Amino acid sequence: MALAKQVLDAINKQINLELASAYIYDAMGIHFAGEGLKGFAGWMAKQAAEEKKHAQKFISFLLDMNEQVRLEAVAAPKQSWESALAVFENALAHEKKVTASINGIMDAARKAGDYASINLLDWFIEEQVEEEAIAQGIVDALRFLADDKGGIYALSQELGKRE
Ligand SMILES: [Fe+2]
Ligand SMILES: [Fe+2]
């Protein structure tokens, strides 16, 4: 069940990117908590937990395939932003980067005729459509609200209800 080297290396790199994503969302949550926007902070904490699960999904796959998991150092994230909009624009840009990375692994898996990886990556491609749409929706709402602090607080409270 050995994976092509290119696919294996890319999945190991992706594990690091998913863990870096968790770290980035935790940093965003900490920032929001400091700004008194507890709802956004809670939403970010749940997002970070989801990214940790994505990393785990790739790790479990490599273990199931009897392949080597290589955990690398996770880069320190940015920790302050000038507005809630700037935070979510950053999150959206990050998700686009993740989507491009998943697409790149899919290209390698297809070239290698690696059906097991293709099947796993199909799930991630669907997940990324959702991740980008959610981030884009929040960016759109914050652009609409502009400097309306009451509206931003209400949006934060609303997103804080996330399951
Ligand atoms: Fe992810
Ligand atoms: Fe994500």
Image (cartoon, grey):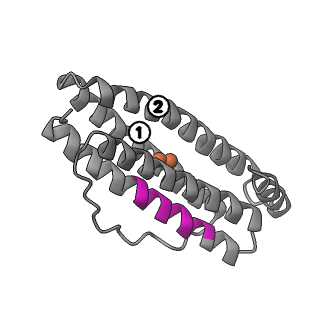
Q: Secondary structure at mark 2?
A: helix
Residue 82 coordinates in the image, percent (x, y) = 59, 69
**Stretch of the chain drawn in magenta:** 18-29
Residue 156 coordinates in the image, percent (x, y) = 77, 58
Residue at the bottom extreme of this rendering: 34
Residue 135 to residue 21: above or below: above
In this rendering, the count of numbered labels is 2
Determine the residue positioned at 75% across, 52% down: 159
Q: Is residue 26 magenta?
A: yes
Residue 116 coordinates in the image, percent (x, y) = 31, 28
The image quarter in which residue 118 lies: top left
Residue 45 coordinates in the image, percent (x, y) = 62, 62
The quarter of the picture where the N terminus appears is top left
Q: Residues within 10 Å of mark 1 (few under 14, many from 20)?
A: many
Q: Main secondary structure of the magenta part?
A: helix
Q: Which residue is mark 2?
A: 123
Q: Is residue 90 magenta?
A: no
Determine the residue positioned at 72% across, 46% down: 141
- Res 134 label: none
Q: Secondary structure at mark 1?
A: helix
Ranked by sequence position, the earlier of labels 1 and 2 is: 1
- Res 99 label: 1
